[in-house]
Image (cartoon, grey):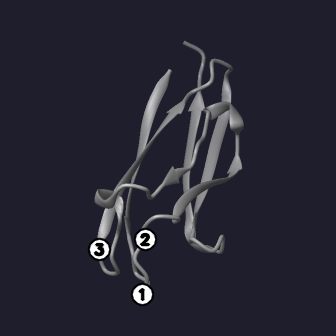
Amino acid sequence: MDFQKIWAIRNTGTCTWDDGYKLVFYAGDRAIDPYDFLFRRAEDFVSPGEGINIGLNLTAPLAVGQYQGHWKMQNDQGQWFGTFLSVYFEVQRP
């Protein structure tokens, strides 16, 4: 089953998140089909003090269990910054 996880985040830094910035899958269960969010389109760019809602389409595996994924921001120089954005969920028997 596919689902969307949406985070509301704010740029509290001094640089605009523009082309080259990304929200990168850092750790967790690959079974959720994680991917990175790339800031490529001008409407996705975030100036200092502004916010954005970032939505990722993920997959809940068929196997019963607990799953998690963690993402972190990366600037256009490849440096990590900010706090982790995470998703936790459990797949139970029907």
Q: Name the secondary structure under disc 1.
A: loop
Query: Which residue position holds label 3?
Result: 50
Question: Which residue of the protein is positioned furthest toward the bottom in this rendering?
Answer: 14
Looking at the image, residue 94 sits to the left or right of residue 62; the answer is: left
Which residue is rendered at x = 33% and y = 76% of the image? 47
The answer for how far apart the CA atoms under marks 1 and 2 are is 9 Å
Q: Residues within 10 Å of mark 3 (few under 14, many from 20)?
A: few
Q: Quadrant of the C terminus?
A: top right
Q: Tell me the kind of residue under disc 3.
A: Glu
Q: Nearer the viewer, mark 2 or mark 3?
A: 2
At 29% from the left edge and 74% from the top edge, which residue is drawn? 50
Q: Which residue is mark 2?
A: 17
Is residue 87 shown above or below 76? Answer: above
How far apart in space, not on screen, are marks 2 and 3 (Cα)? 10 Å
- x, y percent for residue 92: 59, 22
Relative vertical location of residue 70 with respect to residue 48 in this rendering, above or below? above
Name which residue type carries label 2.
Trp
Q: Amino acid at mark 1?
A: Thr
Quarter of the image where one finds residue 48: bottom left
Which comes before the other along the chain, label 2 or label 3? Answer: 2
Residue at 63 percent of width and 44 percent of height: 68
Residue named by callout 1: 14
Rendered location of residue 89, percent (x, y): 56, 38
